[in-house]
Amino acid sequence: MTTFRELLAQRVLVADGAMGTMLQAFDPSLADFEGHEGCNEVLNVTRPDIVRGVHDAYFEVGVDCVETNTFGANLAALGEYDIPGRVYEFSEAGARLARERADHWSTGERPRFVLGSMGPGTKLPTLGHLPYERLRDAYRDNAAGLIAGGADALIIETCQDLLQV
């Protein structure tokens, strides 16, 4: 099968769109969020059917790549829900679900890919919100989970702090 990098060198690859609004359209309950309302990454564990449904909807309309449901699977964002120890768990689960659906939709002529989403969180090391080393280690866990779950590439999203990047 053609690899992500090989195909990217040949043509433009189209990725999916908004994950959060698509998840919310399924109207998950507070129980689905384990009481952490709005923490979409929890759905990777509690409601994988919803996350699969989002990936399938994008693949069905022809995208080449889907992003994992892991934009907030980082120390700062999960810390706001008092569950920062779940970075790896949510990252691996999110990548595994996306990989499952990408493999399902892939053909020899049309491979599909998974982009591991790494969001910025709400704490900036340059401003001293959290020590750089803590963020670095948490992002390492985020990346390790995404890779273990089967991401083809990692995408760093909307970061404005170079130390985050």
Image: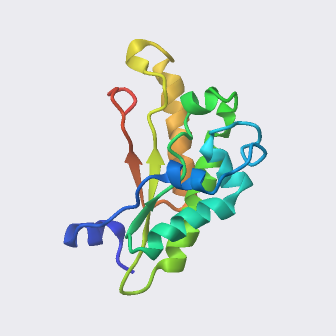
Along the line of sight, the residue nearer the viewer: 108 or 140: 108
Numbered-mark total: 0
Q: Residue furthest left?
A: 10
**Direction from residue 3 to residue 44 in the image, left or right:** right
Q: Which residue sits at x=79%, y=45%?
A: 31
Residue 56 image point, x, y percent: 53, 70
Q: Which residue sits at x=45%, y=12%?
A: 128
**Direction from residue 92 to residue 107 in the image, left or right:** left
Q: Which residue sits at x=50%, y=69%?
A: 57
Residue 98 image point, x, y percent: 54, 63
Compared with residue 143, is residue 66 higher up or lower down, i.e. above or below? below
Q: Quadrant of the C terminus?
A: top left
Along the line of sight, the residue nearer the viewer: 145 or 18: 18
Q: Residue furthest bottom?
A: 108
Give the quadrant of residue 141: top right
Residue 99 image point, x, y percent: 54, 66
Compared with residue 30, is residue 11 higher up or lower down, i.e. above or below? below
Q: Which residue sits at x=69%, y=51%?
A: 28
Q: Quadrant of the N terminus?
A: bottom left
